[in-house]
Image (cartoon, rainbow, N blue to C red):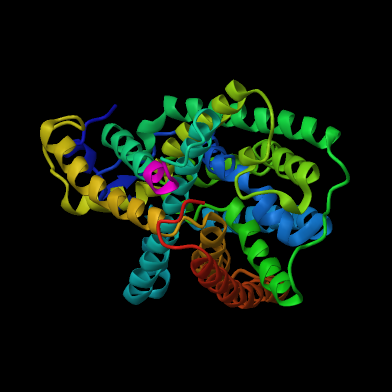
Amino acid sequence: MADFDSGMRESRDLESGDVKVPETAHQISQDSWLQIAFILTTGINSAYVLGYSGTVMVPLGWLGGSVGLVLAAALSLYANVILAKIHELGGKRHIRYRDLAGHIYGKNAYALTWAFQYINLFMINTGYIILAGQALKAMYVLFRDDHVMKLPYFIVIAGFVCALFTFGVPHLSALKIWLGFSNFLSIIYIVIAFILALNDGKKASPRDYNIPGSTATKIFSCIGGFANLFFSFNTGMLPEIQATVKQPVVGNMVKALVFQFTIGLVPMYAITLMGYWAYGNETSAYLLNNVSGPVWVKAVANISAFLQSVIALHIFASPMYEYLDTKFGPTKGGAFSLSHISFRVLVRGGYLAINTLVSALLPFLGDFMSLTGAFSTFPLTFILANHMYLMANKHKLSMPQKSWHWLNITFFSVVSVAAGVSAVRLILADSKTYNIFADL
């Protein structure tokens, strides 16, 4: 693992071929396209997949959910590919989303994009801590259903473990072997949940697949489910992930994206559709709460989901870590010198402490997914990506191509506003039903 010495700050006016690379305290251009593919697959098959049956299929139903999964994947692949293609622009490599926006639009857009991305990643990380806490609680209940330990307690434990992990992994490229563990853990809980749900579905009486609630509730739930669909496929940090890939950065990134949206989607689709088939509109936001089977098997699935969430969180927190390490971190010594470790403990520990507090205060996972999709995934991945590509290639695109991008921009702008209203409504409704620090 490379040190964070002066060599790590090689990117001060460093030239990568003829393309300038900005300063960063983290590694860049070190990873193969396959490692990047595993990073993307870790995100798409994270423990969040255990919630898609309940947060996507239940509000959308068989037709809307099934068609939506295919269309959302296709649109997401397209949006990510065009974003990857403008990673190198104007003789400079843009290793951060905000750098790219700032280059195209100016410094105000730089700040606005950074704010959007920060909110996006903060809410994703909040969701991971909630997921990890739910997994710990579900495992605890298997052995002691005494209601002594409540969800907020498990969320605090999960946040603490996430912090311990991030102290020992200095940057995104350093995950390496952990990505293998992450994908192995994903296979464990997905296979277990799939088999147990299949067995339950075979034994169960006919399920109700109607979208639940009043007409108004159905409409808002449907909009929220639509936002969850696009949330499930996108990271909101593609330039930061692409920054770590070896040259050629565009070709290798496109390979990784194709892997993500083909092979990487199979487990996600399988568990999402199986969970909904088995339990209908009674599917919960955490599928392992629905399944029945041997206690030890469910315990293995839950602990796998917990550990995978810890690893996945580090991916989505890495842009904030990169900013903090580059802006404020020590410049001398190795990655595991006392000064660097102390800095990570203080700064990253404080960041995750805030994340954990929010997670424990409002542990409404489905609502956070909808809110994240509305206020950050849509603007970052679809609205901004299409417009930046349009601006970067405005003299090269034909009129039909320009019209297509403007159609995407307009459509996702409308959807973003509608999904935001729906998500806020759901959070307010749940806040009335449950107290803060709710034990869900």
Q: Examine the structure image and report whether residue 164 is included in the region drawn in magenta.
A: no
Considering every residue shown, the one lying at the far right of the view is 206
Expressed as whole percent of the image width and height from the top left, the position of residue 414 reads 63, 78
- In the picture, measured across the screen, residue 52 lies left or right of residue 277, that is left
**Count of picture labels:** 0
User: Which residue corresponds to the image point at 49% horizontal and 41% vertical from the top-left?
Assistant: 248
Majority SS type along the magenta span: helix
**What's the magenta region?**
149-155
User: Which residue corresponds to the image point at 62% horizontal and 38% vertical from the top-left?
Assistant: 288
- In the picture, measured across the screen, residue 342 lies left or right of residue 165, that is left
Placement of the N terminus among the 4 image quadrants? top left
Expressed as whole percent of the image width and height from the top left, the position of residue 428 reads 51, 72
Q: Examine the structure image and report whether residue 153 is included in the region drawn in magenta.
A: yes
User: Which residue corresponds to the image point at 49% horizontal and 65% vertical from the top-left?
Assistant: 376
- In the picture, measured across the screen, residue 58 lies left or right of residue 34, that is right
Q: Is residue 413 above or below residue 14?
A: below
Q: Is residue 337 above or below residue 251?
A: above
